[in-house]
Image (cartoon, rainbow, N blue to C red):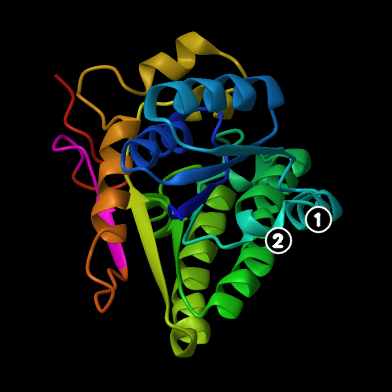
């Protein structure tokens, strides 16, 4: 049977790019996200183009019961997941700590940390039962370096960095590989979500330099996954050439 990759946040950006790449490599896919219409459309496209099987499971990673029930309801054959890509994540707002929104904080913490944990707990147990698997956690340069007004978002990605290391320790005896991928500026819906639909403000984030694109991150993930079974890439930081650190970008 073909290998299986489960991708969270597959409706756009890095998650969608990973779906295309893993389908190309003949993985069957479990695609998850909040927008079921997008998932169904993507599943149909990948099935037609690559002749692979695709299961769709629409849920919000912030809702623990929804995560558990949706994943538990998958047929047994889909629980033999070889690769989990914990991609679902977001940022909300860009304010100093004293002006931050409680709702924005909750959304980031519930999505980036708790959502990752809910999915990982379910899927890692499947992997333990199979005594194999590979978990990819999408972090950020923001989890390595705090930048002005990044406060809570940076904190959530620092938590992902810590959890990536903790998973590696906890799961090593079960033959499970764990990798953290930490991108710099990637032009996706990320900034549009951060600025709550303000496309003009989002566009300015990427003005004057060439950012990464989702396919760059998908290819980096594939590099880690495609190493021989005895090789684990613990973590990779990937940046645009024009970005030297979280806060330093050379703009023309």
Residue 247 appearing in the image: no
Residue at x 58% of width, y 36% of height: 95
Image coords of residue 41 (percent x, y): 58, 19
Residue at x 44% of width, y 44% of height: 148
Q: Earlier in the sequence, mark 1 or mark 2?
A: 1
- For the record, the magenta segment spans 235-243
Residue 134 on the magenta span: no
Q: Is residue 190 left or right of residue 103?
A: left
SS under mark 1: helix
Image coords of residue 177 (percent x, y): 40, 73
- Which quadrant is the C terminus positioned in? top left
The vertical placement of 53 against 49, above or below, is below
Q: Is residue 173 left or right of residue 118?
A: left
Res 172 quadrant in image? bottom left
Farthest front residue in view = 1
Q: Is residue 67 left or right of residue 4?
A: right
Residue 238 on the magenta span: yes
Q: Is residue 94 left or right of residue 62?
A: left
Q: Nearer the viewer, residue 60 or 163?
A: 60
Image coords of residue 45 (percent x, y): 48, 20
Residue at x 46% of width, y 27% of height: 46
User: Which disc is residue 118 wearing?
Assistant: 2
Image coords of residue 161 (percent x, y): 45, 65
Near mark 2 (Cα within 10 A), the count class, few <14, some 14-19 or many ≥20, is: some
User: Which disc is residue 64 wearing?
Assistant: 1
The vertical placement of 84 against 26, above or below, is below
């Amino acid at each position: 049977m073909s290998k299986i990759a489960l991708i969270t946040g597959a409706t756009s950006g890095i998650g969608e790019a990973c779906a295309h790449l893993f389908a190309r490599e003949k993985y069957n896919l479990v695609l998850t996200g909040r927008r079921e219409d997008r998932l169904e459309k993507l599943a149909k496209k990948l099935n037609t183009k690559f002749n692979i099987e695709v299961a769709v499971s629409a849920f919000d990673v912030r809702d623990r019961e929804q995560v558990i029930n949706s994943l538990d309801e998958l047929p047994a054959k889909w629980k033999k997941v070889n690769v989990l890509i914990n991609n679902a994540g977001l940022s909300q707002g860009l304010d100093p700590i004293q002006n931050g929104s409680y709702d924005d904080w909750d959304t980031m913490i519930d999505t980036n940390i708790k959502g990752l944990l809910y999915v990982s707990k379910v899927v890692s147990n499947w992997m333990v039962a199979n005594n194999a698997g590979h978990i990819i956690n999408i972090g950020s340069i923001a989890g390595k370096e705090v930048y002005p007004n990044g406060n809570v978002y940076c904190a959530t990605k620092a938590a992902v960095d810590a959890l990536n290391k903790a998973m590696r320790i906890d799961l090593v005896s079960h033959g499970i590989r764990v990798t953290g991928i930490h991108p710099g500026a990637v032009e996706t819906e990320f900034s549009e979500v951060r600025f709550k639909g303000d496309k003009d403000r989002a566009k300015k984030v990427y003005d004057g330099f060439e950012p990464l694109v989702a396919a760059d991150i998908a290819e980096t993930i594939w590099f880690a996954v495609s190493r021989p079974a005895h090789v684990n890439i613990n973590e990779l930081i990937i940046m645009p050439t024009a970005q030297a650190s979280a806060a330093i970008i050379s703009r023309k």
